[in-house]
Image: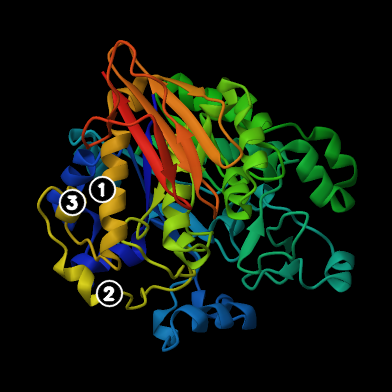
């Protein structure tokens, strides 16, 4: 199975249907059309109730500069705070009422879609209401640590006697709007497993934020200097937690945001899919040798890789590549085995990545795109679509039709030998073969097509191929089908 995931920046996206739109008020036609487009999982990013004082935490100088680059006329009214500084795993009141997520899940399931939500294992909001109720869940430290480092540690505003660590990873400064969960404490592991089970009641999948931070060795590297003998009680959180959820919900899906070459480790611990940022990085570099090397990995790793060009953490691909190269990169990314992972705005051709702390999308469109012909374009029938680039809409419409083919949905993938400039692979079932050849270089290259044999190759969505030699220009591709 070659599933498709579509991420939505929920708190901003909902406004396209009206400023105060709640989740159950989104037109049914929107979900229905996503199903028609072949989407399997809808990730509603940022639905949980966030902590207080969002404005105070979101006005760091670096963040303000990021806001100005994307939204030059931003004001404090546009700041909604990070969705990853969660107070509790309860639906944000602006998005609906208690119980709405379960109703939304049923609605999406009716259209063939599965609902994915966030799970943030490493931290909560720095002033989460859980801290006073369950202080043993969080990493508490002493006066000495605070005196030495007032960036990583803080005194809880509601209880001046308590000092906690902010959430962090071992390579960057602490996130000031968060409090660190203490995975060396049995109470913390039990509490987080309980949260995960409760989330699983209202959705079909979770995307686990910075999932490698809970690994015992990573946690020890980050916090061993304050845990001391507590490190002896550390063990990996995920195997037991995932097993508990899947005992109750066998089809539940786990996606890990993961870096630092920890992808295989988390797959072995039970994750169904793990981020494949390395592929994106290598496509950006343009080194075909390194891309091919990446694709020599075993198929059990490939099929659990989440392939993406964009998400809320990454710059829009059209801000990094010329359109022709970006299309070639997309064709390469999404016709590989694994989870095809798209981000809202990617299909429309957006070029500006919105910081998650902002609640207003920049006005970004090409007036010519609004003259987009709708005949034959399934994407243009998606309610609320705001096309920025008509050519991008047409390209992604083509790509989604390709991904819907039986060979790519359920077939066998094979990496083929090719020249230095080409990326070439094939998908096959007993009834259909689809071959993809991409000239991922700035130079033209000549390709030789094999004789048709017992079946005739045709251009995908095009006529029969009537030649054996073809020149592909820079970043051009050829998609052939044989039945």
Location of mark 3 (residue): 30
Relative to 108, say whether 150 is above or below: below
Residue at the spot 14% in from the left edge and 53% down from the top edge: 381
Location of mark 2 (residue): 366
Q: Quadrant of residue 153?
A: bottom right
| Label whose residue precedes the other's in the sequence (1 or 2) | 2
Residue at the spot 68% in from the left edge and 48% down from the top edge: 136
Residue at the spot 70% in from the left edge and 36% down from the top edge: 186
- Residue 137 picture location, percent across and down: 65, 48
Q: Quadrant of residue 57?
A: bottom right
Are dots 2 and 3 in contact, CB under 8 Å?
A: no
- Residue 169 picture location, percent across and down: 72, 54
Relative to 462, say whether 405 is above or below: above
Comparing 279 with 473, the one in front is 473
At mark 2, the secondary structure is: loop
Check the picture and name the quadrant holding the N terminus: top left
């Amino acid at each position: 199975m070659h599933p498709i995931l579509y991420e939505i920046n929920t708190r901003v996206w909902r406004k396209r249907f009206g400023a105060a739109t709640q989740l159950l008020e989104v037109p049914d036609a929107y979900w229905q059309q996503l199903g028609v487009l072949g989407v399997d999982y809808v990730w509603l990013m940022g639905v949980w109730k966030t902590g207080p004082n969002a404005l105070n935490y979101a006005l760091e100088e670096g963040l303000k500069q990021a806001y100005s680059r994307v939204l030059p006329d931003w004001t404090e009214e546009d700041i909604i705070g990070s969705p990853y500084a969660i107070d509790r795993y309860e639906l944000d009141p602006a998005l609906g009422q208690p119980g709405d997520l379960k109703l939304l899940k049923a609605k999406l399931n009716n259209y063939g879609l599965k609902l994915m939500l966030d799970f943030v294992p490493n931290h909560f909001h720095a002033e989460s209401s859980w801290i006073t109720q369950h202080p043993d869940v969080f990493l508490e430290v002493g006066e000495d640590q605070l005196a030495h480092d007032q960036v990583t540690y803080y005194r809880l505003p509601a209880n001046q006697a308590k000092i906690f660590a902010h959430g962090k990873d071992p390579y960057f400064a602490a996130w000031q709007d968060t409090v660190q969960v203490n995975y060396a404490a049995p109470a913390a592991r039990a509490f987080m497993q309980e949260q995960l089970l409760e989330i699983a009641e209202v959705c079909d999948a979770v995307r686990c934020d910075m999932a490698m931070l809970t690994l015992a060795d990573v946690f020890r590297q980050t916090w061993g200097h304050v845990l001391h003998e507590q490190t002896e009680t550390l063990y990996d959180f995920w195997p037991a937690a995932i097993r508990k959820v899947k005992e109750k919900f066998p089809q539940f899906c786990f996606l890990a945001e993961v870096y630092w070459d920890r992808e295989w480790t988390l797959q072995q611990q039970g994750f169904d899919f793990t981020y494949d940022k390395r592929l994106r990085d290598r496509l950006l570099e343009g080194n075909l040798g390194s891309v091919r090397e990446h694709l020599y990995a075993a198929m059990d790793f490939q099929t659990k890789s989440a392939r993406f060009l964009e998400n809320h953490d990454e710059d829009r691909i059209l801000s990094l590549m010329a359109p022709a190269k970006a299309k070639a990169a997309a064709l390469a990314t999404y016709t590989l085995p694994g989870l095809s992972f798209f981000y809202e705005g990617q299909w429309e051709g957006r070029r500006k990545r919105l910081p998650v702390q902002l609640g207003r999308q920049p006005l970004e469109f090409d007036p010519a795109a609004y003259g987009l012909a709708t005949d034959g374009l399934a994407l243009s029938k998606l309610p609320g679509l705001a096309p920025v680039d008509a050519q991008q809409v047409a390209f992604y419409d083509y790509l989604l039709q390709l991904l819907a083919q039986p060979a790519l949905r359920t077939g066998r993938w094979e990496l083929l030998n090719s020249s230095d400039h080409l990326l070439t692979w094939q998908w096959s079932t007993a009834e259909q073969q689809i071959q993809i050849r991409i000239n991922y270089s700035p130079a033209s290259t000549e390709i030789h097509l094999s004789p048709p044999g017992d079946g005739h190759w045709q251009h995908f969505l095009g006529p029969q191929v009537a030649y054996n030699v073809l020149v592909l220009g820079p970043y051009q591709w050829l998609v052939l089908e044989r039945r």
